[in-house]
Image (tube, grey):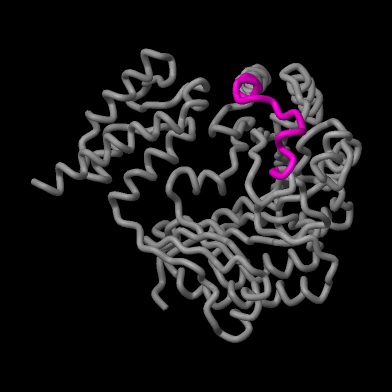
Amino acid sequence: MPIFPRSEKTPLGIYVHVPFCRSKCQYCDFYSLPCQDNLLMDDYVRAICTHIKETGFLAPGYRVDTVYFGGGTPSFLGADRMAAILTAVRQSFDVCPRAEITFEANPDSVTPRLLRRLKSEGFNRVSLGVQCDNDRLLEQLGRPHTYDDAVNAVEKIRKAGFKNLSLDLMYGLPGQTLESWQDTLINVLQLKPDHMSCYGLKVEKGTPLYDYKDVCNLPDDDTQADMYLAAVEILKSRNYRHYEISNFAKKDKASQHNLKYWTGGEYLGFGPDASSDFSGKRFVMVRNLQDYINGIRNHGQVIADIQEVPPRERAGEYLMMRLRTSIGISREEYEKQYLLPFDPLEEILEGCRQRNHALRSDGRWRLTPEGMLLSNTILSDLLLAQDRTISVSKRL
């Protein structure tokens, strides 16, 4: 195995998908299962640890600087099982001593014992799913906790010594008004999180909420837009930096793992339905827990789809992902990395600037909060312009 000086190693993120929950929320379309089966959880842990150990040798030139346990509800898996998976990561990869190591949790599955154990194992960031401060709405959404549970969970997390706490909220909930959303945000900010994620409710096909969406008094698109802009203003006034469409952070508290997704970093995903972007290829694991376990156990196939990503497709991703963030895009980066002209894109962005949907500073283009609301349309225009330049370059 070749030896690489640490300074030359490429940063790598590790994502661990934990597909277990106490119960399934009404709006959730992520791959997760309501499960109380300890034997199944143990089988999952053995499989994912084996998978991690079998994969580590493929990354000698990488150094892991973020590890993220997502779900599902990773905290529902329990401290011992989570610790075993993190140990497998450390044994199989070169993990930076100061790596950001995050786990998602619901308030009902947070206990002092779990927190103490995970803190001692090296977890240093918690992402807590609060979603709302209204117990009636939480019950309607199928959340397995009350707002008091969330308040108590935050107290336990701080008492355990975690100094990097993110809270998730949702807006656009059934019957929610702009004023009630503003009140919710101000109330939750009293918990003094280091990071906030504010997501608009999306009604996805195949979820229970989809079946009764027309009778549950969902706010319309204009109201959701007003809710988004209100969150931007409230969080800005409390010194949270708006660094990605839905994410806000105090100084030095942005999610380093999620920034990999938005800035083109490399990451490896483990567990059913986990995605990876590694060594020029993108691939995803099978979306079935038992198939994943059996595939690892029997040395079978666990990758459901794999594709090599050509540079020109990366050029489109650069636009789509960077414009989600406060980093934005630049002519110099774009033309140097993808050998494509920036002028057709700048023409569109200049039009956006005149409508207060984009701004240019320090040689970089960024979307304004109003532009973020129209990002799908803006990106569609940019990608069409990019496709035209690619077609012309192919004919030359």
**Residue 65 higher or lower than 295, as above or below:** above
Residue 22: give x, y in percent of width and height. Answer: 83, 57
Residue ID at (76%, 25%)? 176
Residue 357's place in the image compared with 210, above or below, is above
Among the 4 quarters of the image, the one containing residue 282: bottom left
Task: Give the residue at x 79% y 28%.
Answer: 188
The answer to which image quadrant residue 193 occupies is: top right
Quadrant location of the N terminus in the rendered image:
bottom left
Locate residue 283 relative to residue 218 in the image: left or right: left
Q: Nearer the viewer, residue 31 or 233?
A: 31
Q: Position of residue 330 (x, y in %)?
A: 32, 32
- x and y, in percent, of residue 44 in the image: 71, 73
Count up the numbered dots: 0
Q: Nearer the viewer, residue 75 or 229?
A: 229
Residue 168 located left or right of residue 284: right
> Taking 375 as reference, is 133 left or right?
right
Q: Is residue 124 above or below residue 77?
A: above
Farthest residue in the bottom direction? 298
Q: Is residue 157 magenta?
A: no
Residue 67 appears in view: yes
Residue 225 is covered by the magenta coloring: yes
Q: Residue at x 65, y 77 (%)?
A: 293
In this image, 143 relative to 381: left or right?
A: right
Q: Residue at x 27, y 45 (%)?
A: 337
Q: Main secondary structure of the magenta part?
A: helix
> Is residue 239 visible from the viewing direction of this image?
no
The one nearer the camera, 355 or 160, is 355
Magenta range = 210-227
Question: Could you tell me residue 82's position as x and y percent?
Answer: 74, 64
